[in-house]
Image: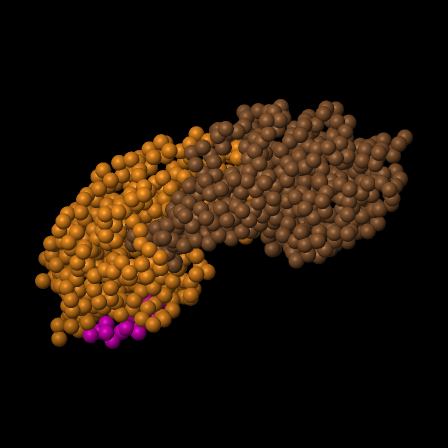
Chain colours: A orange, B brown
Amino acid sequence: MSGLDAALELVRGQRDAHLEQYKEFLRLPSISTLPQHKADVERTAAWVADELRRAGMTTVEIVPTACHPVVYAEWLGAPGKPTVLVYGHYDVQPADPLGEWVSPPFDPQVRGENIYARGASDMKGQIFAQIKAVEALMKQGPLPVNIKYMIEGEEEIGSPNLGAFIDAHRGQLTCDAVLNCDAGIHRPDVPGIIYSLRGLAYFELEVHGPKTDLHSGLFGGSIHNPAQVLCELIAGMHDEHGRVTLPGFYKNVRPLTPEERRDLARLPHSDQEWKEVAGVPALWGEHGYTTLERVGARPTLEVNGIISGFTGVGSKTVLPAKAMAKISMRLVADQDGAEVYDQLSQYLTQRAPASVTWELRELTHGKGAIMDRTTPAMKAAVAALKEVFGVDPVFKREGGSVPVVSLLQEKLGVDSVMLGFAMPDDGIHGPNEKQHLPSFYRGIETYIRFLSGLAM
Amino acid sequence: MSGLDAALELVRGQRDAHLEQYKEFLRLPSISTLPQHKADVERTAAWVADELRRAGMTTVEIVPTACHPVVYAEWLGAPGKPTVLVYGHYDVQPADPLGEWVSPPFDPQVRGENIYARGASDMKGQIFAQIKAVEALMKQGPLPVNIKYMIEGEEEIGSPNLGAFIDAHRGQLTCDAVLNCDAGIHRPDVPGIIYSLRGLAYFELEVHGPKTDLHSGLFGGSIHNPAQVLCELIAGMHDEHGRVTLPGFYKNVRPLTPEERRDLARLPHSDQEWKEVAGVPALWGEHGYTTLERVGARPTLEVNGIISGFTGVGSKTVLPAKAMAKISMRLVADQDGAEVYDQLSQYLTQRAPASVTWELRELTHGKGAIMDRTTPAMKAAVAALKEVFGVDPVFKREGGSVPVVSLLQEKLGVDSVMLGFAMPDDGIHGPNEKQHLPSFYRGIETYIRFLSGLAM
């Protein structure tokens, strides 16, 4: 029996044990954006480091950064063979709105074919499956390739310290290919490979009206309500064709080629299903593009949050002093975050009335990326998916943002292969996040085949 | 020495004692809209009842309603003389945003000529001053008029049970005039009498998009963001001339007469000062009307609060499931709350896109009112103000809403005299609410003179 077959057999026999360990990982509330979870984030880094040691890594380090640590590990016992750098993150999004979870976000529960917990899909399930694949292979003998791990704890806050980490460890991170596990497939029966990601620029906009909350009866009619002004500003950011109106917003957007449009049109997709997954009465978006084009290949502007005035139970007749919105853009090649900051500033300068003042803060930005579909690693991923799922994978453009992909392209000159087993309806970032367990188990097998295939 | 003069002398000698009792009243956090303060509201009702007993009322009752009790009291020892029904409320607005208070909202502190606390101006200071006036008069002998009190605990939540209370106690409440102390003057040196009040209709509008919060990368571009839709709907509620666009909104608005416009123009008012009090870079409002006209005689639509999605620290890339706004209108004669509900519904039906659903809830509504300026009570109020302040009072139209005025007009057929000593810059409903103490002491004297004058 080959090492590959033995490893596959091994993981098939260990599904229950893997599920228990996976649950242990999910119980750690590693919410990177909330300061009160700092110790949990650190415990999670230590947990991942232990797993990597158990898998057989010869070097495992927890490297501090200005905020949350990076877990670095390596095993370099295959001289002459390719070196793969595995990227992942062990941090998760906040769990609110808490009241909408069927089971508590950090008490993982299996219902049907899914496991429910914050981070189950994004992305503890993916990175854990990859480590289990390596562990199984190493139990059969030396790994067929050299392997390095860079697992960060700040992805959900925009990876503020990852660039500096890569700069400081550039030599150590040298590799032939990056395996980025922060990815998903299209449907349980349709494996896919993402070759394009959107960038993200995230802002906070605050509109200031009166110096303090006022009585809406005494002052209403004489003061421009900052909540109303914020609404007016936001309303003006899209035109009636669903296009973003910031000056120059589409100037650097790389148009879809006819070939790409054909490829995207061939993807299994139903607007009806998409509508049902989202639970909306009708879809919406930029005119002239299909849903998958709008989500994968067109930039967007989204209100992520908005707050002003009195929002408790009952009626408080206040004219609020200020109003705040969180606004983010998903960017496509070749837009960049600095440019959209300027566009948004310019829009606000042109549109904001003299009756208020405003303040725009950038919280984070990262570029989009398009990957070469013809590298050996990409081919190994295609072959592995085909073996495990029994069908050819589809090529996808992804709407989400994985800034590390463009960061590694830029700093190490290496393309990433996006290989992960999340599903579009996993509810990541929302309540009741889940991971489809059969896809998780197939994921372990795919990672085993990918690493074996890459060695050949 | 007459009873009047003796009473005036008495209250002048008791200012320190009155201030201490006033502080005690202000320490009671009688926030009617917050269920967790229910016991505090009840304690406050009991405190007011005790004060009325101490002042000399022969009947004092705490009458339960479906929510917070009404304090009723009477002294009817002056047969043949007029009967005055004193209206007030002992409840207060919530104190948020708490962080903006210089001193805690329920720990009253005197700084300069003002006392700072939630409710100091709206309206514990006013009703307390009135009770102290009666107490002083009763210490000199029988009151010159019959007096009844109706002090409710639900004014700040729209007086939901006051109508039923009045209906149930119609006989008991019979009177010749209503003295409504929930009022203010224009400036410390300019006494004023309000003869017109705006009505209030308060709504909650919820826009529903996806069934759960979604990842803004995976779904952004395909789903109409409910926060964006809510902003679009709100933005469309005013046109570029600051006019409300709800269909038919101005249809029943009683136009200002040339005489009223002249009267309002004669009021001491400076847009520059108004701007400074509010702390805004520029005033705003419906074109074609002066500030005092817009605030006092024109209807308005205000966003009192808005919330959606993630509003904590940091960046959460969520496409929110829903967005909510609190929206209220100040109404003028002859608009009514039911009619604006229909107008708002109609607007939403016309404008809301098919990509979302929405829900409109009415929280409260009350009509505006215009009072006869020539009644004996109105004349007694004018004379009392002139005696105490040394100048003729001005007649004002008030932007705030005192629904009880139209309620009493409708149910008892009696006009109210609005006599109180709040100031436009008191910061009622906002942080750092204050009451000007010299005006509070003048208020006690004015109430003494008003009651004495009414008897003649």
Quadrant of the image for the C terminus of chain B? top right
User: A262 or B162, which is in the foreground?
Assistant: B162
Q: Is residue A439 visible?
A: yes
Above or below, A13 relative to B230: below
Question: Could you say which quadrant of the image residue B134 lies in?
Answer: top right
B316 on left or right of A179:
right
- Say which quarter of the image contains residue A438: bottom left
Q: Nearer the viewer, residue B198 or B155?
A: B198
Tell me which residue sits at (41%, 54%) in the image. Answer: B357
Left or right position of A433 against B331: left
**Whether residue B41 is situated above or below residue B83 in the rendered picture:** below
Q: Nearer the viewer, residue A19 or A171?
A: A19
Residue A143 seen in this snapshot: no
Which residue is at 59% across, 40% downward? B334
User: Does the magenta run of residues contain B382?
Assistant: no
Instruction: Report the magenta stretch's main SS.
Output: helix
Q: Is residue A321 left or right of residue B64?
A: left
Residue A22 sits inside the magenta stretch: yes
Residue B211, quarter of picture? bottom left
The quadrant the N terminus of chain B occupies is: top right
Magenta segment range?
A9-25
Q: Position of residue B21 (x, y in %)?
A: 75, 42
| Identity of the residue drawn at 68% across and 46% down | B410
